Amino acid sequence: MSILRLWTDGSWALRVAAIVGLGWAAPVPTAVASEAPPAADPGLSPAPHRMIVLTDIEADPDDTQTLVRLLLYSEGIDIQGLIATTSTHMRTSVHPESIRAVIHEYARVHGNLVKHDPRYPRPETLATLVKEGRPEYGMSGVGPGKDSEGSDWIIRTLETDDDRPLWVSVWGGANTLAQALHTLRATRTAAETERLAAKLRVYTISDQDDSGPWIRREFPSLFYIVTPGGDYGAATWTGINSVIDGIDNTTISNPWIAEHIQQGHGPLGAAYPDVAWGMEGDTPSWLGLIPNGLGDPEHPDWGGWGGRYELYRPEVPVTNPRTFIGGVPIEPETRPIWTNAVDEYTPPQTPENGRATRRGETSFRGFKETLWRWRDDFQNDFAARMDWTTRSFAEANHPPVPVLDHPDELTVESGGGFGLSARGTTDPDGDSLSYFWFHYREAGSCEGEVTINGAENAVGARVTAPEVERPETVHLILRVTDKGDPPLSRYKRVVVTITP
């Protein structure tokens, strides 16, 4: 993991972070933001993750909600397809026109978004990416002669000369992807099919048709993130909209959504529909692709805005009707998949007096915690992006740029002390910054808790490595939050290998 791989939002941020990270002198930020960021330098900016979306838009307003948010992050995620599909909730129709309707509202604010980052794609480009799958449910839409515009587009995208993995973000049923794989296997050699399938990274919001289990069984090496079956309450993604006792749930409340997203934020905000069954249940399928310095999508077990997942074969109670897909029992899993993991999370405290941020006292444990622990951060980030649709660069907030004074991979001896520092960190708006260092225990192999010596909220920190009998890894996270409105957070992850 290199400095350049942990890139942050905004082309101005990319340039500063990359230059400082490579050891060159960075420009000193001014206290007053300029009217527009400098253009991204392609020599310093790593390629964004590419992604195709499968959406059962119109089955539930939350697909439209998620699409509104996604378009606000389209400068940092390379969207390569927006495919309308069916699901168990909408079995006989697809609605590409509803995707185009959201793009139309994006077009009305595109001119303002590029004031904040010139990489936002042109709406005409996005419109060419809208495709449709077959208006059939699940495996009834998979087989010889069942190709569609959507399945053909997946194959075409896979076959482009691009070494980057292709993420498939599945918000509804997965049968359009299943058809693409079916056709590949029928028309290409086994070696070519395996090569192309190896480029896929699939994140499915539960199973919303019977094609997901088929894909996992027939393509056992395919990278696949899912909580299998139709029991939504058992799924990690529900952490985005679950009301949790003992914490502040304001940022997922209807009044917050109305104030910060829907009203007074131009046509794209007005296009964000009210919550019906649940807010943005599909958004976690791509949150981890946002380049915020926290996650590495190739390592779902490291955790990030989209949750944390571990690779194992889950034992799903297949006879429990709650797990059924469309009223039909699911198949047992035949191989390991990336699925629910458990975090123990202790939210930090921010008291009125004394240390501004410190370790909290109340802990929560569960699979939803792997996602909702970041919820206030990514909701505030969404609100700031929505501000970008109507405000000038100087009037809006932009995320800070964390910079480490040392590599993001360290090797230390058991029991030894070492230092961490983020003194090169900047903010494009000249905002005051808060720091918080913490140990993400579940992301590493070291079972014990590693504590920060002294204040966790200083720009630098001292840590004592635990005693180990064999090499272990520890993940230490820096969270930098500005004091803008809304406050925005970015991160650095330091992976420490401890040797005996």
Image (cartoon, helix red, strand yellow):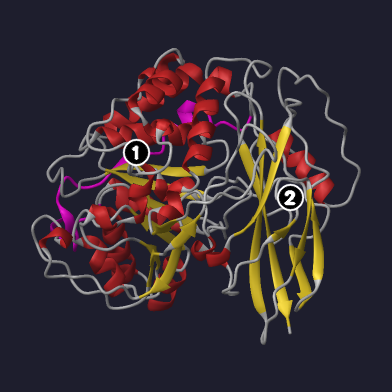
Q: Percent from the top left, x then y, of residue 35? A: 72, 17
Q: Do labels 1 and 2 touch, CB within 8 Å?
A: no
Mark seen at residue 455: 2
- Looking at this rendering, what residue extends furthest in the front direction? 353
Q: Horizontal placement of 8 versus 217: left or right? A: right
Q: Percent from the top left, x then y, of residue 255? A: 36, 22
Camera-side residue of 258 and 108: 258
Camera-side residue of 301 and 331: 301
Q: Quadrant of the N terminus?
A: bottom right
- Secondary structure of the magenta portion, mostly? loop
* Amino acid carrying mark 2 in the image: Ala
Q: Magenta residues?
A: 118-147
Q: Is residue 447 placed above or below 138 in the rendered structure?
A: below
Magenta-colored stretch includes residue 302: no
Q: Percent from the top left, x then y, of residue 246? A: 40, 43
- Looking at this rendering, what residue extends furthest in the right direction? 25
Mark 1 highlights which residue? 280
Camera-side residue of 274 and 93: 274
Q: Quadrant of the C terminus?
A: bottom right
Q: Residue at x 27, y 38 (%)?
A: 278
Magenta-colored stretch includes residue 130: yes
Label 1 SS: loop
Q: In this orientation, does residue 360 appear? A: yes
